[in-house]
Image: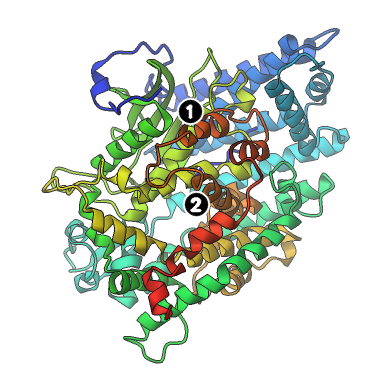
């Protein structure tokens, strides 16, 4: 996941060996001064003050507005406000102290107020609109054109009273979104279990969860605890209890918060002349219109349903081995039954690959794979202070020069964001500022006695987030902060990360790092083949599940808030767009964090999956690094950042707009006549 902010040369991989070299990097790390709350707030306020000085310069121009006297200071304001917002948002999610997180939340509100004030500043809008761009390069022209659209979407051309009201509403929206996110992060639930209920779970998992004095094992709803239960626990009752706990996080606390957020955003949209938030929110996206989201949901459903039904029949047949009269499958049973089918029909046990995926090896392997694909190298910066001792700091090196920096905060702790994301920290500006970003994840932490074995899904998630990271760094070499990194239409942001997920299926890539943590034996080729065949099972069901999430996101934002019943929307979407039965006592929407950041645009994940698969088929699947596809991908898709429309990025690489052909082929690989599913279906 890429966090949506409310603000405006081949090298042999040497990611460890290069630490012996010393590169001069004058840009200090984000935590170089180890700030306490007061120092943090001073850093933030200094950036906001610098932004105001830059805006004042724009407004003070007498005579002709030029790129030098208008766009340059405007972009400086953008750089400063973004940096303040990025850091405040990060600290809200990762700082180990609750008090510090509270101050970060308050600061994020302040930053948002500044950003909103700029977006509604008619003098700044008029100054940018008056620029003569006839001699400007294409990227600069596109930047100004898109920025003027964002100004109009903010309401800058409305009367004073409307702009004042919009400022209040945007501030309220920011506060509510922060509260929604914080409630999810802060609500870690505990599920008590009898030790016998851990039967089926990996031994290292059982070893990490010893019974207390009362004989009970206590499991949290954090990902490393919860997800293995859904996949491996033989106890149906434990999986059901964990599902209820997991899907009632932040409930009922987030009910009032989310309803107020819906009302606030609806009011913003209608003040700006749009019938709904979904319509308003789509106006600066690739999709362009809110109603097209609904059309896209139906198109995906039609494409996926026949294949999903065949998968479902295989799952139902598996369930009937122990429940002969079964006619339905509860949503919480999906992962467990899928694991059983993969074992029975594909001779693949997800636990069989975990010994080949210890965390440190996976990390190194992903760095090495990225180094080869993107023709860069990585150097760890040693003894760098951070908000937590586990955080690592790395430089990205291109042709011997640093082009970016990233941080890895990879393991769970109380109060930390509980999902996985890449978040920007600094926008890159060519010759002025290195782009910086962070991966915030929750993978098992290795210890002296526990290598932190990862699942297939964990490794895939790591690849996904690293795709975002490289997009931000490689796209962060622009002249302007406002078009740097992942700043194009936000419904493109998941495509590069979803494309990089596919690298886990490559035997060529896995052979470089997937080695047994005890013996050092490389992962057997036949195990990789079985893993890939098994991974193909359930893809249509996954697409339908994503389609249901997309429908939830769209349906709660497509009309009037007073017509929305959050539980009804959630349950209805699950029933309509998947074949699984939801537990009525769950309240999934309360912890569905994307309803805050992505709001009505969760369709982005499926929209970009279509693009990602279209991208991936351009590579040689026998050797992903062969041919011109890797270099063309870096040059045409990643390096432009937000300097042109994402629609053009797609067409420049594919030679045409995206279509669903590659996605349909990807979904149907299990039933192409060679897989176990095809045999089970009698083909």
Residue at image coords 28%, 70%: 343
Q: Find the residue positioned furthest to the left.
A: 519
Q: Position of residue 446 (x, y in %)?
A: 22, 44
Q: Which of the two labelled residues, at mark 2 and mark 1, occupies the earlier sequence position?
A: 2
Residue 363 sits in which quadrant? top left
| Viewer can see residue 93 | no
Mark 1, other Cα within 10 Å: few <14 / some 14–19 / many ≥20: many
| Numbered label tally | 2
- Kindly give the residue lying farthest to the right in the view shown: 159
Q: Are marks 2 and 1 in contact (CB under 8 Å)?
A: no
**Mark 2 and mark 1: span between their CA atoms?**
31 Å
Above-or-below relation of 573 to 640 = below
Disc 2, SS: helix
Evaluate whether residue 655 shows in this view. yes
From the image, state whether disc 2 or disc 1 is nearer to you.
Answer: 1
Q: Residue 280, percent across and down? A: 75, 47
Q: Residue at x 72, y 54 (%)?
A: 263
Q: Relative to 637, is 221 on the left or the right? A: left
Q: Which residue is mark 1?
A: 473
Is 30 rendered above or below residue 468? above
Q: Nearer the viewer, residue 663 or 94?
A: 663
Residue 536 vertical position relative to residue 328 in the rendered view, above or below: above
Q: Categorize mark 2 by other alpha carbons within 10 Å: few (<14), some (14-19), many (20+).
A: many
Q: Position of residue 370 (x, y in %)?
A: 38, 34
Viewport quadrant of the C terminus: bottom left
Colouring convention used in this rendered image of the protein: rainbow
Q: Residue at x 62, y 20 (%)?
A: 480
Residue furthest to the top: 63
Residue located beneath label 2 in the image: 183
Nearer the observer, 86 or 426:
426
User: Could you tell me residue 132's position as x and y percent?
Assistant: 82, 15
- The residue depicted at 82 percent of the width and 44 percent of the height is 272
């Amino acid at each position: 996941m890429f966090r949506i902010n409310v603000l405006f040369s081949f090298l042999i991989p040497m990611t460890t060996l290069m630490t012996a070299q010393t590169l001069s990097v004058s840009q200090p790390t984000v935590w170089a001064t180890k700030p306490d709350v007061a120092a943090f707030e001073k850093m933030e306020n200094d950036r906001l003050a610098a932004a105001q000085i830059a805006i004042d310069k724009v407004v003070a121009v007498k005579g002709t507005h030029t790129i030098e006297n208008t766009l340059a200071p405007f972009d400086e304001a953008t750089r400063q406000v973004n940096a303040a917002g990025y850091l405040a948002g990060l600290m809200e999610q990762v700082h180990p102290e609750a008090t510090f997180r509270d101050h970060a939340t308050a600061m994020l509100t302040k930053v948002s107020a500044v950003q909103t004030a700029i977006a509604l500043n008619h003098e700044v809008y008029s100054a940018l609109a008056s620029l003569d761009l006839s001699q400007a390069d294409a990227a600069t022209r596109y930047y100004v054109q898109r920025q003027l659209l964002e100004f109009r979407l903010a309401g800058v051309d409305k009367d004073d009273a409307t702009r004042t009201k919009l400022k209040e509403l945007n501030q309220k929206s920011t506060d509510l979104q922060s509260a929604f996110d914080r409630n999810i992060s802060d609500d870690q639930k505990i599920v008590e279990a009898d030790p016998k209920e851990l039967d089926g779970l990996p031994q290292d998992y059982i070893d990490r969860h010893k019974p207390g004095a009362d004989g009970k094992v206590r499991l949290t709803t954090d990902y490393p605890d919860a997800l293995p239960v859904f996949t491996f626990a033989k106890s149906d009752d434990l999986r059901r209890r964990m599902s209820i706990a997991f899907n009632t996080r932040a409930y009922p606390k987030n009910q009032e918060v989310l309803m107020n957020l819906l009302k606030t955003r609806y009011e913003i949209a209608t003040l700006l002349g749009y019938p709904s938030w979904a319509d308003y929110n789509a106006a600066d996206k690739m999709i362009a219109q809110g109603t097209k989201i609904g059309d896209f949901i139906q198109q995906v459903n039609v494409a996926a349903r026949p294949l999903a039904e065949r998968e479902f029949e295989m799952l139902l047949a598996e369930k009937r081995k122990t429940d002969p009269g079964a006619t339905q499958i509860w949503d919480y049973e999906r992962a467990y039954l899928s694991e059983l089918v993969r074992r029975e029909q594909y001779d693949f046990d997800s636990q069989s690959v975990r010994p080949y995926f210890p965390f440190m090896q996976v990390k190194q392997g992903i760095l090495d794979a990225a180094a080869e694909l993107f023709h860069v190298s990585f150097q760890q910066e040693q003894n760098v202070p951070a908000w937590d001792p586990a955080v690592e700091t790395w430089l990205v090196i291109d042709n011997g020069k640093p082009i970016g920096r990233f941080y890895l905060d990879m393991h769970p702790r109380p109060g930390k964001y509980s999902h996985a994301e890449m978040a920007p920290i600094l926008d890159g500006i060519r010759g002025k500022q290195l782009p910086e970003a962070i991966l915030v994840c929750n993978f098992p932490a290795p210890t002296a006695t526990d290598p932190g074995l990862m699942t297939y899904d964990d490794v895939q998630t790591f690849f996904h987030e690293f795709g975002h990271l490289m997009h931000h760094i490689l796209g962060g070499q622009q002249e302007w902060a406002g078009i740097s990194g992942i700043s194009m239409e936000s419904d493109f942001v998941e495509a590069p990360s979803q494309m990089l997920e596919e690298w886990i299926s490559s035997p060529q890539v896995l052979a470089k790092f997937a080695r047994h943590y005890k013996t050092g034996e490389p992962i057997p080729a036949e195990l990789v083949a079985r893993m890939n065949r098994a991974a193909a099972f359930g893809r249509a069901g996954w697409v339908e599940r994503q389609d249901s999430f997309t429908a939830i996101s769209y349906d709660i934002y497509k009309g009037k808030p007073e017509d929305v019943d959050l539980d009804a929307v959630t349950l209805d979407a699950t029933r309509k767009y998947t074949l699984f039965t939801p537990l009525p006592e769950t309240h999934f929407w309360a912890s569905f964090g994307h309803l805050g950041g992505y709001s009505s645009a969760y369709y982005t994940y499926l929209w970009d999956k279509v693009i990602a698969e279209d991208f991936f088929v351009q590579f040689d699947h026998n050797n992903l690094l062969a041919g011109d596809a890797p270099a063309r991908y870096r040059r045409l898709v990643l390096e432009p950042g937000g300097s042109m429309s994402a629609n053009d990025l797609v067409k420049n690489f594919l030679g045409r707009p995206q279509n669903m052909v590659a996605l349909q082929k990807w979904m149907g690989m299990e039933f192409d006549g060679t897989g176990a599913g095809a045999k089970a279906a009698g083909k």
